[in-house]
Amino acid sequence: MASATLKIFLVNGNPKRLRTAELSNWTGKAVAGPRSEIEGILKRDESKNPGVYFLTGIDPETNGPSIYIGEAESIHDRIKGHLGKDFWNHIVFFISKDENMTKAHIRYLEGRLIDIAKSSERATIVNSQGSGSKLPESDREDMEVFLDKMQQVLPVLGIEVFVPMVQQDTSTDTKKLLTCKIKALSAQGYLTPNGIVVISGSQAVLKERASAKNYPSVLNHRNDMIKNGHLKHVKNHYVFQKDVEFTSPSAAATVIHGGSANGLLAWKTKDGKSLKELELE
């Protein structure tokens, strides 16, 4: 993505409360805030416009992030219909300041956003089927540009559902690859802005140690990966079937080791330097 200047206005001076966001030289505008301030949010003029919106919260079954992705010709009217749902606690919506966004445009954006969220696999999507819309080629390209701008703004507003899994660039210097070993098993990964990605084909121990119980969330993540087939039982160990991103080197190392592990010491470069040593350089 190209560099950009983002202007965030804190309506009440509090970064957790109502705020707006705009990129320089862009017709789009975002409004975000907690559900506790929904009345004030829906009183804003922007909510009367057509646009796309995101309701975010925690999925009670997985205890992970969940999101509803929708579109409406009047954000104000549509959101009122969601007040009976209790899974969400935060809202973000986007409108166009030039008022040229049509029903077809917002339906196209909704469909694309749902597809992107599915591919990123970062959250449970409450409405997994978008309405979608076919657009003329020129309109479609305009909406793709609008979509790119939205994806620059969304993480700043706390929504990372659309951030794709970072892929290792084949041209990247292999010195950036890290290795986590236990016994005869080995896993490879690389650091990302969100933590660390363990690369497909990496190995993990078959049985958890007693210390794994000290990290229930990590243990649950490991069990979910086994259940979903992301960790496959091969002979006397597990093998990662896809690239998996973890929030920290320690979380990844704990899954690989089957018990507590200090990621700063467990992950090393090909020269044998640990992450801790690299940070001290």
Image (spheres, helix red, strand yellow):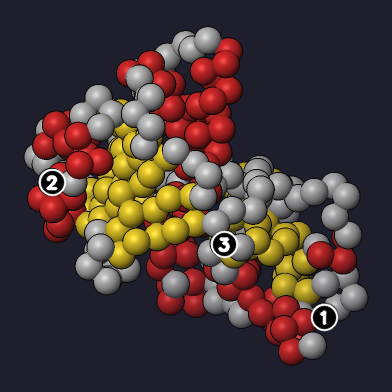
Of circles 3 and 1, which is in front? 3
How far apart are labels 3 and 1 at the CA level?
22 Å
Q: Nearer the viewer, residue 168 or 105?
A: 105
Kindly identify which residue carries mark 2.
Answer: 43
Kindly identify which residue carries mark 1.
Answer: 273
Give the number of the disc on residue 194. Answer: 3
Q: Nearer the viewer, residue 70 or 135?
A: 135
85 sits left or right of 31 in the view: left
Q: Looking at the image, which residue is at 57% across and 16% down?
A: 138
Question: In which quadrant of the rendered view does residue 192 lie?
Answer: bottom right
Q: What SS does tag 1 mark?
A: loop
187 sits left or right of 96 in the view: right
Can you say whether 248 is above or below 264 in the image? above
How crowded pointer 1 is (Cα within 10 Å; few <14, some 14-19, many 20+) is rated as: some
Q: Looking at the image, which residue is at 30% across and 65% down?
A: 10
Residue 89, x across and y down, in percent: 22, 53
Can you say whether 77 is above or below 243 in the image? above
Q: Looking at the image, which residue is at 36% across and 46% down?
A: 30
Q: Is residue 135 visible?
A: yes
Nearest to N terminus: mark 2 or mark 1: 2
Nearest to N terminus: mark 3 or mark 1: 3
Question: Pointer 2 and pointer 1: residues touching (CB < 8 Å)?
Answer: no
How far apart are labels 2 and 3 at the CA level?
35 Å
